[in-house]
Image (cartoon, rainbow, N blue to C red):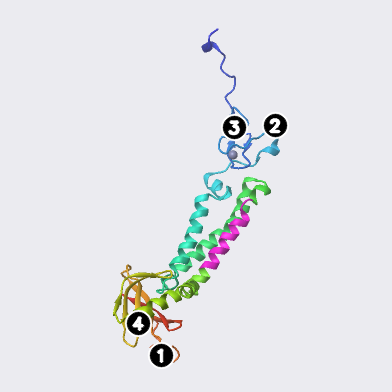
Amino acid sequence: MTALDLPVPAEPASTQPIGLCLDCGYALRGLPTPRCPECGRGFDPLDPATMNMGRELSPLAKWVLGPIRWEVNWLSWGALAFALWSARQPGEELARSGGWLILVGLAALWLAWPFVRVIAARKYRWPHSLLMQGQKLRVAVGLCFLLVAAAVHYSLPMKAAVKFSRPAMQKMASDLLASGQAYADDQWVGVYRARRIKVVPGGGVRFTVEEQNRAYKSGFTYLPKVDPKKVGWRNKSYRYVGDGWWAWREEG
Ligand SMILES: [Zn+2]
């Protein structure tokens, strides 16, 4: 008898999975060894406690119920860091343009996710223990988005950045005023890249931080002799940030 003469199995391998992988939700069927091919977790085909006996998930449900993807996680923290870094600018573009509302929207998505998971888990009869995985992290990321949105709205990153950078800004301004020159080279002052640094009338110094954007420019001006309480130009594009410094913004 040759190999070709071997009898064909009487019935085709069942297409129904015996269960789902507890870690990754992979549908366990037709496997030569009792080990998940996706993540390597072992299971016992005869012991339902070693498997997730819920229904197989649609791709969307898999995404909702599965673990937090590292891409999603890192993109979120990256977006938060980027928002904070952008909001340090004197132009306050994120707060003015309503960009901070995008952060509120992302917060809402993260905070709604645990509830969507509860609904999906009920539908797919997933065990509660699996459902709770990563729920705290989802809530934490959502709350971080809310906090950053509020901070951006109230210009807290800019205030903190000014506070941090002020000694360097002060030194740069004092050095330029003492040198008798009218201009200084581009340089970093704290977290700001200062360009077009120049002496302005009244014993002050002005520099530009943002100018690559065609819609507006922004920067800081040092006017130590101007009393912010008495100043007449309560112009929206000038905002006093303390110790003689003003954040300015020019449209167009
Ligand atoms: Zn698995």
Image spot of residue 243 (x, y percent): 45, 83
Helix, strand or loop at disc 3?
loop
Q: From which residue to which does the magenta span run? A: 133-148
For label 3, the residue is 29
Secondary structure mostly taken by the magenta-highlighted segment of the chain: helix
**In contact (CB < 8 Å): disc 1 and disc 2:** no
Asked where in the image residue 89 lies, by quadrant, the reply is bottom left
Q: Residue at x 70, y 34 (%)?
A: 47
Image spot of residue 10 (x, y percent): 59, 19
Q: Mark number for residue 178?
A: 4
Helix, strand or loop at disc 1?
loop
Helix, strand or loop at disc 4?
helix
The reply to whether the magenta stretch includes residue 145 is yes
Mark 2 is on which residue type? Leu
Residue labelled 2 has its Cβ within 8 Å of some atom of ligand 1? no
For label 1, the residue is 231
Mark 3 is on which residue type? Arg
Q: Residue at x 65, y 35 (%)?
A: 43
Q: Mark number for residue 32?
A: none
Residue labelled 1 has its Cβ within 8 Å of some atom of ligand 1? no
For label 2, the residue is 46
Furthest residue toward top: 1
Could you tell which of marks 1 and 3 lies nearer the N-terminus? 3
Mark 4 is on which residue type? Ala
Q: Is residue 226 above or below residue 248?
A: below
Closest to the camera, between mark 1 and mark 2, is 1
How busy is the neighbourhood of tag 3: few (under 14 within 10 Å), some, or many (20 plus)?
Answer: some
Q: Residue at x 48, y 73 (%)?
A: 164
In this view of the protein, which residue sits in the foreground, 160 or 111?
Answer: 160
